[in-house]
Image: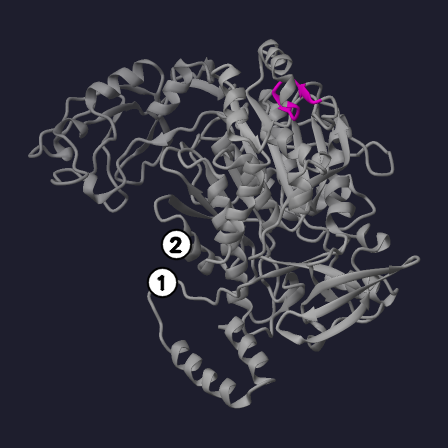
């Protein structure tokens, strides 16, 4: 509706009566409500592209004078009709997109290109640096981009191939924590929640196409501001997937707020495909921890003596356990007591106390073990008498070891280090215990202050990033779904400080895995920095502005620092990693990463192979981000360990010979507009090699996606 209202206001400038009539009809429609989650779609969303060269035909916005903030009246979109150059100066003739009678002339330097999300984009990537410390391991990828366009880009490289997506989207707190249409969304914005939902829906729909439809997971971290809405939105987008929500304590002390309960937790949605298995995982390290002894008496009233129906016990689970009154050790048991038998009539052996399962109120219960199972476990040292409770109906606490613990002992995960005087086992864990986590997490390693913000202050001592996630919380969340996938692809398109990429590196170190992370973040500055930089007559696109953006100032430096083990100043990082894998931060990781900035290319230049260097990284990423990249095809063709590219089809024989000699090659890119020639090359290739036609597949991919975004 907000989009309709904007259009009605535009009509009102030309015909007030017509605008009023339209407003009446729209208001009537707005009163209708359908079932499900209802919100305004706010189409189209727009994004400014500072640094993108202005070309004829572009949509642009005229920037405000330096030092000033754009006003609503200056937020119009224009089409570039012509660009004139006079010496070093360039001016553009512009026409208003909504009123072709309105035209102006502007310096090109005062224009910024704008992309609406119904416009087709033709993306490329430009490398802005790399770290190589992992030998022949695949590269992690960091992309500086508007995440919607980056997701569209990944549909060309990773459609249906992503194993896990972890995102920590803006919480929509009203404190200028995110932008919509280039403006910070504040608490007073009446469309704040619907803008956020529209913003999220577009991205989650694309994310679904990236996920492996048979075996993958989406993980969304959120707080109480939007958790109800995002839950409904996820159900609408993923109706056939399993969804669970976890409550996780991130600040045990709580965040104090006026006249509100102190917030200590956030919520994590797990959305997984039908074929996805959750791996029981380590949440706390149990190595060296003694085994747990459980109470052997049934707890539920349904397990009381003589009860029938669900939960009732058999007649051989009510018997006396003979405990030596002097030593407190079990000496044996009696025969199961029939239902009509009375405890008061039972005679214990001399010197022993007859212990029957009874509650403190006198209700006779049953043991958790039958008489035969008791005999077997007691003989193995898995049953013992605990403390005396002589003043209560059950005069000794009887304890036993659960079947799962016994299985861990038999499998060597628990070591029996000795036996107590009563013959009961003394045992402790020698491996990290695997458990299925509960839906309530209160785990010390997930403290965001200590293991998020605090850890980041060690890595980037002179830089601040608010609300960094606990590294170990992200690591644990990922482990449930990628611990059994050593080559998993993990995507985070709200990468922030880069915690998810950091967590993937830790997981790889723990099992020598080859998982790849893809981190997408823009280069926005905070609202406070935005004002300070404006006051310095700077604006987006200026070097001094961009160097303070989140990607350049936080994400890239953090990932580079944790791999090298050194701060941006070149000093060894102080401190140690904790919990699951403990080692000094200064050791770094054996990992590779490359940093990219998303570019916006002209389709005709792409189709005529004039921008291959911008498309080359996409081909490399599509084939696994590993080994040498083909950046130059001036020789007509080239082949690497994983893929090949041919542009000169007169050299097909040599190309095919190179393909056959590369044993690990799985994909080739064939540049031709001729169907016959393409098929001819395909017939010459080995059967295991996937052929991709350039640039048809590239152009078609983004034309389809631009059409999808209007629906």
The reply to whether the C-beta atoms of the residues labelled 2 and 1 are less than 8 Å apart is: yes
- Furthest-bottom residue in view? 17
* Residue behind mark 1: 36
- As rendered, which of 236 and 570 lies closer to the eye? 236
- As rendered, which of 191 and 174 lies closer to the eye? 191
Q: Is residue 451 visible?
A: no
The quadrant where residue 13 appears: bottom right
Query: Which residue is at 52% across, 45% downward?
Result: 442
Q: Which residues are magenta?
A: 636-648
- Place of residue 277 in the rendered image (x, y in percent of width and height, measured from the top left): 40, 31
From this view, report whether residue 271 is shown above or below residue 86: above
Q: Is residue 178 visible?
A: yes
Query: Which residue is at 64% across, 62% downward?
Result: 179
Query: Which residue is at 53% across, 42% downward?
Result: 701
Looking at the image, residue 172 sits to the left or right of residue 428; the answer is right
The quadrant where residue 309 appears: top left
The quadrant where residue 383 appears: top left
SS label for mark 2: helix
Query: Which residue is at 55% across, 89% downward?
Result: 16
- Place of residue 147 in the rendered image (x, y in percent of width and height, measured from the top left): 61, 49
From this view, report whether residue 650 is shown above or below residue 85: above
Magenta-span inclusion, residue 647: yes
In the picture, the disc for residue 236 is 2
From this view, report whether residue 239 is shown above or below residue 678: below
């Amino acid at each position: 509706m907000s989009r309709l209202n904007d259009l009605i206001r535009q009509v009102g400038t030309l015909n007030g009566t017509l605008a009023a009539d339209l407003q009446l009809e729209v208001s009537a429609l707005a009163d209708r409500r359908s079932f499900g989650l209802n919100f305004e779609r706010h189409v189209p969303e727009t994004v400014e592209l500072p640094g993108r060269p202005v070309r004829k035909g572009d949509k642009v916005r005229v920037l405000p004078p330096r030092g000033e903030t754009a006003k609503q009246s200056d937020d119009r979109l224009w089409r570039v009709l012509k660009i004139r150059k006079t010496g070093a100066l360039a001016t553009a003739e512009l026409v208003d997109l909504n009123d072709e009678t309105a035209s102006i002339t502007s310096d090109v330097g005062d224009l910024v290109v704008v992309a609406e999300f119904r416009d087709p984009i033709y993306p490329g990537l430009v490398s802005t640096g790399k770290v190589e410390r992992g030998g022949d391991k695949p590269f992690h990828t960091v992309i500086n981009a508007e995440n919607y366009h980056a997701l569209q880009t990944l549909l060309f490289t990773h459609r249906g191939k992503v194993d896990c997506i972890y995102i920590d989207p803006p919480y929509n707190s009203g404190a200028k924590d995110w932008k919509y249409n280039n403006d910070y969304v504040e608490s007073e914005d009446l469309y704040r929640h619907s803008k956020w939902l529209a913003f999220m829906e577009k991205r989650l729909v694309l994310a679904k196409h990236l996920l492996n439809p048979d075996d993958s997971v989406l993980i969304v971290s959120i707080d109480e501001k939007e958790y109800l809405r995002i839950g409904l939105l996820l159900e609408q987008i993923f109706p056939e997937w399993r969804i669970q929500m976890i409550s996780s304590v991130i600040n045990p002390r709580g965040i104090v707020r006026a006249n509100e309960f102190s917030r200590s937790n956030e919520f994590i949605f797990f959305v997984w495909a039908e074929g996805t298995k959750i791996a029981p995982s380590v949440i706390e390290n149990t190595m060296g921890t003694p085994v747990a002894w459980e109470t052997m008496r049934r707890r539920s009233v349904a397990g009381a003596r003589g009860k029938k129906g669900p939960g009732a016990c058999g007649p051989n689970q009510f018997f006396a356990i003979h405990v030596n009154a002097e030593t407190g050790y079990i000496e044996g048991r009696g025969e199961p007591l029939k239902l009509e038998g009375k405890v008061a009539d039972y005679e214990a052996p001399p010197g022993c106390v007859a212990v029957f399962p009874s509650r403190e109120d006198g209700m006779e219960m049953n043991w958790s073990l039958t008489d035969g199972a008791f005999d077997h476990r007691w003989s193995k040292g898995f049953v013992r008498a605990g403390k005396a409770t002589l003043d209560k109906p059950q005069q000794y606490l009887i304890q036993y070891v659960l079947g799962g613990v016994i299985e861990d002992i038999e499998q060597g995960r628990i070591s029996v280090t000795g036996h107590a005087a009563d013959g009961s086992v003394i045992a402790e864990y020698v491996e990290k215990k695997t458990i299925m986590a509960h839906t309530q997490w209160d785990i010390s390693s997930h403290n965001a202050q200590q293991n998020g913000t605090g850890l980041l202050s060690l890595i980037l001592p002179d830089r601040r990033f608010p609300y960094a996630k606990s590294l170990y919380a992200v690591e644990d969340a990922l482990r449930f779904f990628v611990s059994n996938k050593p080559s998993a692809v993990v995507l985070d398109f709200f990468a922030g400080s880069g915690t998810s990429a950091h967590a993937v590196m830790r997981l790889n170190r723990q099992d020598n895995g080859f998982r790849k992370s893809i981190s997408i973040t823009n280069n926005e500055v905070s609202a406070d920095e935005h004002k300070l930089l404006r006051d310095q007559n700077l604006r987006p696109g200026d070097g001094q502005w961009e160097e303070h953006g989140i990607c350049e100032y936080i994400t890239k430096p953090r990932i580079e620092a944790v791999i090298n083990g050194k701060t941006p100043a070149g000093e060894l990082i102080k401190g140690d990693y904790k919990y699951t894998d403990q080692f000094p931060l200064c050791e770094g990781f054996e990992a590779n990463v490359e940093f990219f900035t998303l570019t916006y290319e002209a389709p005709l230049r792409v189709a005529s192979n004039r921008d291959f260097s911008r498309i080359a990284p996409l081909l490399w990423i599509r084939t696994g981000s590993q080994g040498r990249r083909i950046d130059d095809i001036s020789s007509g063709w080239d082949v690497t360990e994983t893929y090949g590219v041919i542009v000169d089809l007169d050299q097909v024989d040599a190309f095919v010979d190179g393909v056959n000699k590369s044993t690990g090659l799985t994909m080739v890119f064939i540049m031709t507009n001729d169907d016959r020639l393409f098929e001819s090359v395909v017939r010459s290739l080995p059967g295991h090699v996937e052929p991709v036609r350039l640039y048809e597949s590239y152009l078609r991919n983004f034309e389809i996606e631009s059409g999808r975004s209007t629906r």
